[in-house]
Image (cartoon, coloured by chain):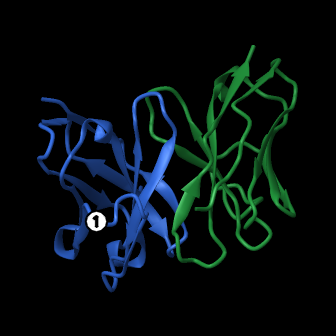
Amino acid sequence: SYELTQPPSVSVSPGQAARITCSGDALPKSYTYWYQQKSGQAPVLVIYEDSNRPSGIPERFSGSSSGTMATLTISGAQVEDDADYYCYSTDSSGNHGGVFGAGTKVTVL
Amino acid sequence: QVQLVQSGPVVRKPGASVKVSCKTSGYTFSSYGITWVRQAPGQGLEWMGWISTYNDKRKFAQNFQDRVTMTTDTPTSTAFMELRSLRSDDTAVYYCARGVAQIYPDYWGQGSLVTVSS
């Protein structure tokens, strides 16, 4: 089965940059999407198609992808960015649907 | 605005079935699919499957292929997910989300807690 690998946790001080990686063999052929999930809430899409920001998402959220690794960067992290972040993609064949990474807990303190 | 409103929490016994509803509004129902995702307590997100609201095409994760049914009702812009032969490890929050093409979910419902307990 297809898997996406994320680090379990990332810590950052307010105002500093937080970088979350996501690796997967199919990423060179498939887009990566990023979701933010705060405690007790539904996920929110923050990046789609590797690097695009939906309307209403702050500019400090950016995404990139190169080879088998995608990266979500929070530039100037704020206390309110403290949350779990999940990457998501599909396998390049389209046969196995979607898959989420295990999630990265971002702590801003 | 796009909204997906799900049915309330339920408790089921092992071996039973559960059907979760997802009523949508704020967009053209047949222009997007519906994706279902679940999250066990303290765990990550698990993609369950996707259904087209246009032609009823479906795609399921292998873990659920034999136990899940996904349907839609266009007149009421509502989607349904039924999971059968429930086990204790099916205890989770089940989310519906608007599916863009067959590819990714963008707007999410608030989640429906399903507890499986004897």
Q: Secondary structure at mark 1?
A: loop
Instruction: Indicate whether B67 appears above or below B16.
Output: below
Is residue B30 left or right of A37 when viewed as pictured?
A: left
Mark 1 surroundings: few (<14), some (14-19) or many (≥20) residues within 10 A: few
- Indicate the chain on which mark 1 is placed: B
Going by the numbered disc 1, the residue's amino acid type is Asp
For residue B29, which quarter of the picture?
bottom left
Nearer the observer, B6 or B84: B84
> Would you name the residue on which mark 1 appears?
B66
Residue B68 location in percent, x, y?
Answer: 26, 62
Expressed as whole percent of the image width and height from the top left, the position of residue A39 reads 50, 26
Question: What's the residue at 70%, 21% (across, down)?
Answer: A107
- Chain shown in green: A
- Chain B as rendered: colour: blue
> Quadrant of the rendered structure where residue A90 is?
bottom right
Q: How many marks?
A: 1
Residue A15 placement (x, y as % from top left): 85, 23
